[in-house]
Image (tube, rainbow, N blue to C red):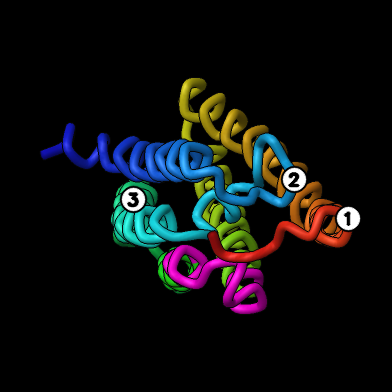
Amino acid sequence: MARFRAAIPLIACGIAITTIILCFIISQSLGHDTGGLTWPYVSDTGRDDPEHIVFAIGLTVAAVFYVVTWKIVVQYVRSLFSDDEFTGGVKFALGAVLVLQILAAIGLALLAIFDTLDYPTVHLISAILFFVLSIIATTIVTVVYYRRAKHKDDDSTINNARFKLAVLCIIWILFIIYIPIGLPLADYEYDDVRTTDGTLGRA
């Protein structure tokens, strides 16, 4: 059972990556428009049918595994605290993490179901919902884990916590590049390509 729980995050990532690759292959083989880009944005790999069906089903299933993954993460962090140490603040923080990640998973499912062609606004809002809520929740659980690790006289635990903080910093950098900077640039670039070649439309 423990091995199965450990495999859940890998299954979630595997489903998501496989879905995107399959959608890209289908899109390319059918000659569907990718906004003039050789390597389309992830969302555009599932813009047209039939790849949109694969995109919607695959990422919705991945969203379910995503929730299970975070349930396991929260349970693990909870296990680091004794009953006396599991105070209201920690309990609230971990509860908030789980709620935020459930909402993030809903955002992931919605962005998968509502494509960028017919529902661009819903898709964009869902994508932002997923990324913003997931990174906030990840930050909270990482801080809780780090603060707990500092009270343990265990070098491996402390080093693990520092590694998680470093990874979190990288995630924040990528998040800032993608959301506040990347989305406006992507929208401008796609609008420019759409205007010049006029190839927008469901194939």
SS state under label 2: loop
- In the picture of the structure, the residue carrying the numbered disc 1 is 196
- As drawn, which residue projects farthest toward the left? 1
Residue found at x 46% / y 36%: 25
- In the picture of the structure, the residue carrying the numbered disc 3 is 69
Q: Nearer the viewer, mark 3 or mark 2?
A: 2
Residue found at x 66% / y 36%: 39
Viewer-proximal residue, 105 or 101? 105
- As drawn, which residue projects farthest toward the top? 155
- Whether the magenta-drawn stretch holds residue 148 is answered as no
- In the picture of the structure, the residue carrying the numbered disc 2 is 36
- Look at the image and tell me in which quarter the C terminus lies: bottom right
- Look at the image and tell me in which quarter the N terminus lies: top left
Q: Tell me the crowding category of disc 2: few under 14, some 14 to 19, or many 20 or more residues within 10 angstroms, Cα based.
A: some
Q: Position of residue 28 (x, y in %)?
A: 53, 38
User: Would residue 142 be found to the left or right of residue 41 on screen?
Assistant: left
Q: Tell me the crowding category of disc 1: few under 14, some 14 to 19, or many 20 or more residues within 10 angstroms, Cα based.
A: few
